[in-house]
Image: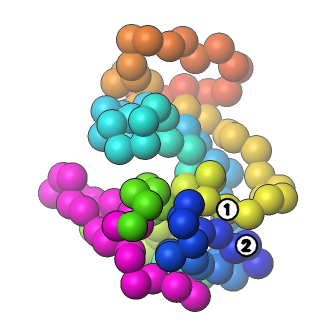
Amino acid sequence: MHTGSCLCGAVAFTIDGDLSPPSVCHCSQCRTQSGHVWASTSTHQDNLSFTASDTLSWFRASDIARRGFCSACGSFLFWQHNDEDTISVSMGALREPTGLMLSKHIFVADKGDYYDITDDLPQEAQ
């Protein structure tokens, strides 16, 4: 069981199920919404339940997915593809210890010009 919340606590959740190895997304949308890169894990959507969600808002930044955030504090919490039954969850929102380790970088072809990726994790262009 994992628990997490936004910065102000108005959105709080539990995950009762497996979490994928986390990845770091370098796409321009994640960088813009998070302020840099976005590290996330994913789980089946049925594993996610909310203990508080009054300020949970969803934003469609594209035709293929939606992004969940707290409308009170602005924390970027979730990303969900329209055609999938999984949901990505912000690593920063999860209470520690998570027991997880970063596994790869994604959308590195779109990474910002202000930083380098210096670890040895696999990198996917998309």
Q: Which residue is mark 2?
A: 2
Residue 104 part of the magenta segment: no
Q: For this view, does 118 lie left or right of residue 98?
A: left
Q: Sequence order check: which comes first, mark 1 or mark 2?
A: 2
Q: Position of residue 31 (x, y in %)?
A: 39, 35
> Between 58 and 81, which is closer to the camera in this rendering?
58
Which residue is nearer to you in this view: 1 or 121? 1
Q: For the residue labelled by badge 1, is the local secondary structure a helix, a strand or a loop?
A: loop
Q: As rendered, which of 82 and 114 lies closer to the eye? A: 114
> In the image, 17: left or right of 116?
right
SS for dot 2: strand
The answer to whether marks 1 and 2 mark residues whose Cβ atoms lie closer than 8 Å is yes
Above or below, 80 against 15 in this view is above
Give me the residue at 33% from left, 37% from top. Answer: 32
| Vertical side of 20 occupied by 102: above or below | above
Q: Residue 125 at what x, y percent from top left?
A: 41, 26
Instruction: In the rendered structure, find residue 71 and report the number of the disc placed on it.
Output: none
Point out the stretch of residues depicted in magenta: 50-71
Point 38% across, 75% down: residue: 56
Question: For the C terminus, which image quadrant?
Answer: top left
Q: Is residue 14 rendered to the left or right of residue 11? A: right
- Can you give x and y, in whole percent of width and height, for residue 50 in the image? 54, 85
Give the residue type at disc 1.
Leu
The amino acid type, in three-letter code, at marker 2 is His
Q: Does residue 41 show up?
A: no
The residue at which mark 1 appears reads as 94
Identify the residue at image location x=79%, y=59%. 96
